[in-house]
Amino acid sequence: MRIGIYGGTFNPIHTAHVHLVREFIKRLSLDRVILIPTGTPPHKATHQLASGADRIEMCRLAAADIAECPVTVSDIEVLRTGKSYTADTMTELKAQYPDDELFLLMGEDMFCTVEKWYHPERIFAAAEICAAPRDKDSFQMLVTHGEEVKEKFPQLRFTVQNIEFLPVSSTMVREKSLHGEDISGLVPAGVAEYIQKKRLYTHE
């Protein structure tokens, strides 16, 4: 089985995340995708971070909109105490799915620093890294970066897919929510309803 792994703060998950997942499913012929909201992200401030339970539920609501293949949500990082590292997660998932092919999905920003992450060699040993550029001009830059990283980490397997970039961010959604503005179109409908119902991101 070909399993896509897509992790992120998902604070909240939005339409650009969903778009990326759908495109990777088609381009990589994935049989399943696992969304993994981070617990305590080591590289981001936790200001205005929704609870793990809320972010998991929003991911589940977004996953319901993806019909291309089964999409599930894992609480593996939310339940982990302390800092949450991708290397630990991928090692656990590889042990859990030893006979399956794992594909770690990410955008340009993450791919450009992946070799500096905590124990990158463990990540590369567990999964093929799959990146998408922010614009058509950065496609070759990502390919070149991947080739340079591979010189230092020969076990790296990577692909860059020229997926259209949607200019939506979690920060944008939180800002609009804070000011009582409409967020429809920025997040899946079920996620918008959940944010409004729970009054998430309505306070600084």
Image (tube, helix red, strand yellow):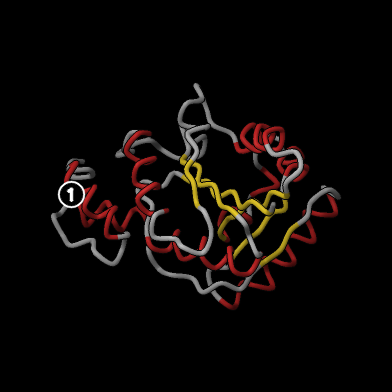
Please tell me in which quadrant of the rendered image residue 160 appears. bottom right
Please tell me which residue is depicted at 39% across the width and 40% down the height of the picture.
Answer: 56
- State the residue lying farthest toward the left: 180
Please tell me which residue is depicted at 49% across the width and 21% down the height of the picture.
Answer: 81
Say if 85 sits above or below 172 in the image: above
Q: Which residue is mark 1?
A: 196
Left or right position of 46 against 74:
left
Report the amino acid beneath label 1.
Gln
Instruction: Give the SS element for disc 1.
Output: helix
Say if 154 sits above or below 65 in the image: above
Please tell me in which quadrant of the rendered image residue 49 appears. top left
Disc 1: CA contacts within 10 A as few (<14), some (14-19) or many (>=20): some
Q: Position of residue 164 (x, y in %)?
A: 51, 74
Please tell me which residue is depicted at 66% across the width and 64% down the height of the picture.
Answer: 28
Q: Position of residue 4 (x, y in %)?
A: 61, 52
Say if 54 sits above or below 112 in the image: above
Q: Position of residue 136 (x, y in %)?
A: 58, 78
Left or right position of 157 against 82:
right
- State the residue lying farthest toward the bottom: 136
Quadrant (top left/top right/bottom left/bottom right) for the C terminus: top left
Left or right position of 105 against 190:
right
Left or right position of 64 against 90:
left
| Numbered marks: total | 1
Q: Position of residue 88 (x, y in %)?
A: 64, 31
Q: Nearer the viewer, residue 136 or 64?
A: 64
Please tell me which residue is depicted at 13% across the width and 55% down the height of the picture.
Answer: 180
